[in-house]
Amino acid sequence: MRLRLAVACALLVAVATTRPPVLDEEVYLDIAAQLQGHPWRPYDWWRPMQPWGDTPAPDAFLFAHPPLHLLWVTLWTGLLPWGPALRLAVAAPFAALLGAAAGDLLLRESPRAQRGAWLWLGSPILWLALQSGLMIDLGVVALSTAAVAASLRARETPGRGAWEWAEGALLGLACAWKYPALILALVLSLDALRSGRRPWRALLSFGLIFGGVQLALTAAYGAPHLLHVLTHAGEIARGPLLGRALGAVARLGVALGPALWLTLDRRWRIAVIVAALPLSVVALGEGAYTGLDRGLMVLWMIGGLSGLGVALGALPRPGRAGLYGAWALAAVIGVIVGHNYAGGRYLLPAILPIVILGAEGISRRWMILAVIPWMGLSLATSVAEHRQAQAAVEVVERLTASTAGAAPGVFTGEWTARWALRRAGWRFVSSGAGLSPGDRYAEPLRASPAPRPAGLLPVAVFESDDRLPLRVNDPERHIGLHAETLGASPLGLGDGPLERLTLYEAP
């Protein structure tokens, strides 16, 4: 099972290698390009973004992530040009590690529970994370899942010293990849105490790696990076707490589907159904949602609440069940409390433990009925994200063709649009930028544009030919799988082009 899941995850990476950068993959490619030649100072770069705006900063030590992912992408971008080989090199090792670690955990369970591998592989959130491997999320989830697998081997294997060293080392790497993995350090420490272990080897190897990274950054920049990030966290915009909480539950429902509702006892089932409708109403608010949108939100809420119910029910149980319940709940709470918004990919650590806990209670027939539609949804969301990225590239190509011979202008927007416009020579400007008469200003509709300067005159509009109805990001329709601040609904249907870019001119 370990090998099969490792291969399956690597194949999901491979089928998406031709897609352009999506989401913050553009960020990491930009940072890696700037770090070539001085990777030992991983925050000696700058780009217009929160909280600096367009005012250059001496360094980016305020950047909220530790350096290992930045250095990993820097290594491969120094060896390979942009293209499929680069995507494979960055993502495939962690995809294989994640699959192998998931298989190792599943092999400890009953044959019936092992069928949960299909539920896990059928998750749209897993698919998107594997196919956006330049993002930071895949690496941290692979390392943290491997740390849990090593921890259980240390608990259940005679002569466990080597596995304790591995547990701490993997967890240290995960926390030096992305700081929210620190919540897993707390979960594993409490589990060790609960099981009567004193894993000093794990603590030592964790301290050597994570503490060593912080000491190196202190020597280079004068302060521990984690402390610096925490003390300046208020400078980065955040969504409201209630929105993050409801957004996290809904996106967990997208990840898991409603099948786990069948595994709950009667009281939990009733509680989930009773809670799903009012929570859906609160989550969607008074936006211009259709009846289908509201029905889907109820479905997402049932799925998310059922997953939380499975984890909560396992929490008091001894052994692996209690560990999995704590792991899943900690991951969800970490998104609600620790992140700036509830993105679907942030919930990836919670999916595997919930599936392991819940699969035991699903019959073969219901497992098939649960997996098939969710596999279809995973394929559809993968296609939708890919085609939306391609649509951004398409409208930029049309812009550059129509303005051939003229000097590039300035633009707003993020993600694939920012990557494509920068490659075309256009310059990014933040909100509030001053423009001179005659300056041209490009604004993609769905790529998180900043507020437009007042008084600009529209010159031309460029629309993509692709009008795929399924949307993972459509702020006009309040749809935003990757952040509830973009739209309360994780998935939905839309009409019109997948991307529209408007060219303005300053009078």
Image (cartoon, helix red, strand yellow):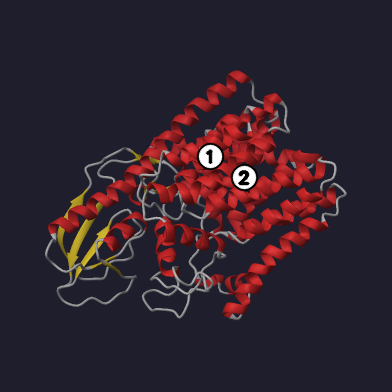
Residue 373 percent coordinates (x, y):
48, 27
Helix, strand, or loop for circle 1? Answer: helix
According to the picture, the residue beneath numbered tag 2 turns out to be: 350
Residue type for callout 2: Ala
Examine the image and state in which quarter residue 307 appears: top right
**Along the line of sight, which residue is nearer the eye, 336 or 114?**
114
Residue 64 percent coordinates (x, y):
54, 66
Position of the N terminus, as image quadrant, is top right
Horizontal placement of 401 versus 163: left or right? left
Horizontal placement of 267 versus 318: left or right? left
Are the residues at dot 2 and dot 1 in contact (C-beta closer than 8 Å)?
yes
- Furthest-top residue in view? 365
Residue 147 percent coordinates (x, y):
69, 49
Q: CA distance from mark 2 to mark 1?
A: 9 Å
Residue type for callout 1: Ala
Q: Is residue 110 above or below residue 191?
A: above
Q: Earlier in the sequence, mark 2 or mark 1?
A: 1
Q: Is residue 432 above or below residue 261?
A: below
Helix, strand, or loop for circle 2? Answer: helix
Residue 421 percent coordinates (x, y):
27, 60
Horizontal placement of 378 versus 120: left or right? left
**Along the line of sight, which residue is nearer the eye, 395 or 447?**
395
Q: Is residue 481 visible?
A: no
Q: How many marks?
A: 2
Residue name at image x 50 percent, y 45 percent: 92
Residue name at image x 72 percent, y 46 percent: 150
According to the picture, the residue beneath numbered tag 1 turns out to be: 255
